[in-house]
Amino acid sequence: MTIITDPHCTHYATPGHPERPARITATVAHLRGQTRLPLRWAEPLPVPEAALHRAHIARHLHRLHEPRDFDADTAYHPGIYDRAVASVGGALRALECALAGEANFSLMRPPGHHATATRAMGFCYLNSIAVAALEAHARTGKKVAVFDFDVHHGNGTEDILHHRPGVAFFSVHQSPCYPGTGLEHRGENCFNYPVAPETPRAAYRDELRRALDDLAAFGPELIGVSAGFDAYVGDPIAQETLEVEDFAWLGGELRALGRPLFNVLEGGYSDDLPELILAYLAGITPR
């Protein structure tokens, strides 16, 4: 199992913001201290400009350098463009690992799945999973699916991928909830599975299983995973019911699909995030 991270991703913060550096620092410390899984550590890859332009318009990339906030939740920080690009590089390193047959997880911030082709929003500046999925398809010609289990709909990933051949997007998320999208399928390659707040765990698992069955029917040769851990019962900004063992189960279900996975951290704001990630890593680790 390769963990991709970079301490520079903790070098910005907004006081009181749930998307905080401790999400990474606490998880790194927890993973380094555990003996359950053998891990190796890697850094993000450099990001070719062409890869960014597959997912984002040039004006958006320029806008990330401008010293003004993007919305109430998504602040400008000096160097945020470089931090966001490094997060994309983490996703590309995870893709590289997947293509080499290695289990992986990109433990980086900022997250990315709310960033659309044209704007930053929802704590997200560049859409790491979308860039990696498009890079995977461009490089290999293989069919690529993105599975998003963050409690919030990956509106940015859907925006970028919905008209692209050879890729598909599957999202299981709470509704109503930010950003208020993902109520129904979109086009022929974006599939949404909204669940109500406080859905019982068994019913939530059923919806995850339904989405994974549909994903398998798409026939992907590679799977990108937007791994958000905010459907956890203890998360402070959502109202769902999943427990630690549900993330281990989900990791096992993804592994059982028998396709290379490239895994990218999205949300998850509980202090229990390190244990949730470790449980998921145990699930996706080959037996």
Image (cartoon, helix red, strand yellow):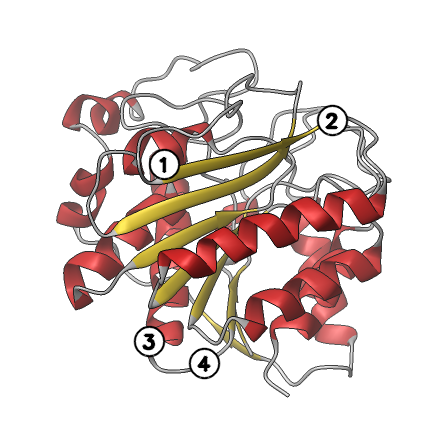
Quadrant of the image for the N terminus? bottom right
- Write down the residue under mark 2: 196
Mark 1 vs mark 2: give the one in front.
Answer: 2
Q: Position of residue 21 (x, y in %)?
A: 64, 43
Secondary structure beneath dot 3 equals helix
Q: Position of residue 13 (x, y in %)?
A: 59, 32
Q: Residue at x 39, y 12 (%)?
A: 68
* Mark 1 neighbour density, 10 Å: few (under 14) some (14–19) many (20 or more): many
- Write down the residue under mark 3: 99
- Relative to 96, residue 147 above or below: above
Mark 1 vs mark 3: give the one in front.
Answer: 3
Three-letter residue code for mark 3: Leu
Tell which circle, 3 or 2, labels the residue nearer the N-terminal end: 3
Secondary structure beneath dot 2 equals loop
* Mark 4 neighbour density, 10 Å: few (under 14) some (14–19) many (20 or more): some
Three-letter residue code for mark 1: Leu
Q: Quadrant of residue 17?
A: top right
Secondary structure beneath dot 4 equals loop
Checking the image for residue 261, the label placed there is none
Q: Position of residue 227 (x, y in %)?
A: 57, 51
* Mark 3 neighbour density, 10 Å: few (under 14) some (14–19) many (20 or more): some
* Mark 2 neighbour density, 10 Å: few (under 14) some (14–19) many (20 or more): some
Mark 3 vs mark 2: give the one in front.
Answer: 2
Q: CA distance from mark 1 to mark 2?
A: 28 Å
Tell which circle, 4 or 1, labels the residue nearer the N-terminal end: 4
